[in-house]
Amino acid sequence: MNVPKSVAIIMDGNGRWAKAKGMPRTYGHVQGAKVVEQICEDAYNLGIEYLTVYAFSTENWSRPSDEVEALMKLLRDYMKNCIKRASKNNMCVRVIGDKSRLDKDIQKSIADLEEATKDNTGLHFTIAINYGGRDEIRRAACKIAKKVKDGELKEEDITIESFEKELDTFGLKDPDLLIRTCGELRISNFLLWQCSYSEIYITDVAWPDFNKDELIKACEAYSNRTRKFGNVL
Ligand code: IPE
Ligand code: IPE
Ligand code: MG
């Protein structure tokens, strides 16, 4: 099997999964968060080198405030525990998205986590929080505009490569494979620039039920694709 080196996942379906069990949506988020840790290990053991997951979108703020609060609490706990796990698994962890809107203590945990794991040589694990592809491109454009204004960059030097340097994902590998769980056929503002030529795999399995076998199925489907551009196999 030709395993994708870089995989991105839209972890969707926590709410529907919980509802089907007669439980509150937040129960689905709690279970979904537990799956992430295992998938990181499975991904690395399969030969995946970069894994990027969508945890909270710029649009997710418009959910009911109690759900947003529950998600922020989960993220807060996740960031704190992640340092230990990342050290054990040798993962290099990074957070993409506009962190400035997050509570200060979460920002601090993220900074500590990124600093503590930056030299780890295992899986490059990236978590998208308050992330939106359009917002990321907008922020990059602002940085470019400032550089041009300050005379640090000439207009003719704005290339694909120089633009990419200003994206949150700079230094990471564009996804070879984009997985979305729970059946929706859309990108929902995730990695718009980076997924230009990613292969897309959508499964009906909800995120809390996603496991190693499902990941292998996605990789097998990928392995049977004929790619264009991107990382042509
Ligand atoms: C994905 O599950 C988790 C987040 C977006 C934070 P959802 O909460 O979107 O669950 P569904 O799609 O409503 O089932
Ligand atoms: C995408 O899922 C965002 C995350 C997984 C964090 P959503 O459930 O928020 O996306 P839509 O609303 O179905 O497009
Ligand atoms: Mg959803």
Image (cartoon, grey):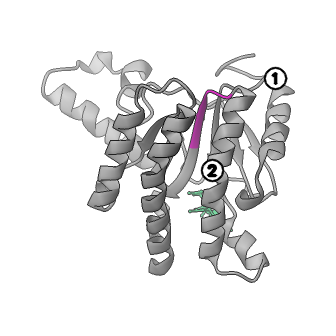
Q: Nearer the viewer, residue 177 or 143?
A: 177
Q: Residue at x 36, y 21 (%)?
A: 162
Q: Residue at x 84, y 44 (%)?
A: 213
Predominant SS of the magenta segment:
strand
Q: Quadrant of ligand 2?
A: bottom right
* Image height of 162 relative to 72, above or below: above
- Residue 126 position, x and y percent, is 51, 40
User: Is there any visible trace of residue 133 in the rendered image?
Assistant: no
* Image height of 168 relative to 147, above or below: below
| Contact? badges 2 and 1 (CB < 8 Å) | no
- Horizontal side of 182 relative to 147 (left or right) equals right
The C terminus - image quarter: top right
Q: Residue 49 falls in which quadrant of the image?
A: top right
Q: Element at badge 1?
A: loop
- Residue 19 position, x and y percent, is 73, 78
Q: Hey, what amino acid is under mark 1?
A: Thr
Picture mark count: 2
- Residue 146 position, x and y percent, is 19, 33
Q: Residue 41 falls in which quadrant of the image?
A: top right
- Horizontal side of 9 relative to 163 (left or right) equals right
| Residue that label 1 marks | 226
- Horizontal side of 144 relative to 119 (left or right) equals left
Q: Hey, what amino acid is under mark 2?
A: Val
Q: Residue at x 66, y 25 (%)?
A: 5
Tag shown at residue 36: 2
The magenta-colored residue range is 48-52
Q: Is mark 2 within 8 Å of ligand 1?
A: no
- Nearer the camera: disc 2 or disc 1: 2
The answer to which of marks 2 and 1 sits earlier in the sequence is: 2
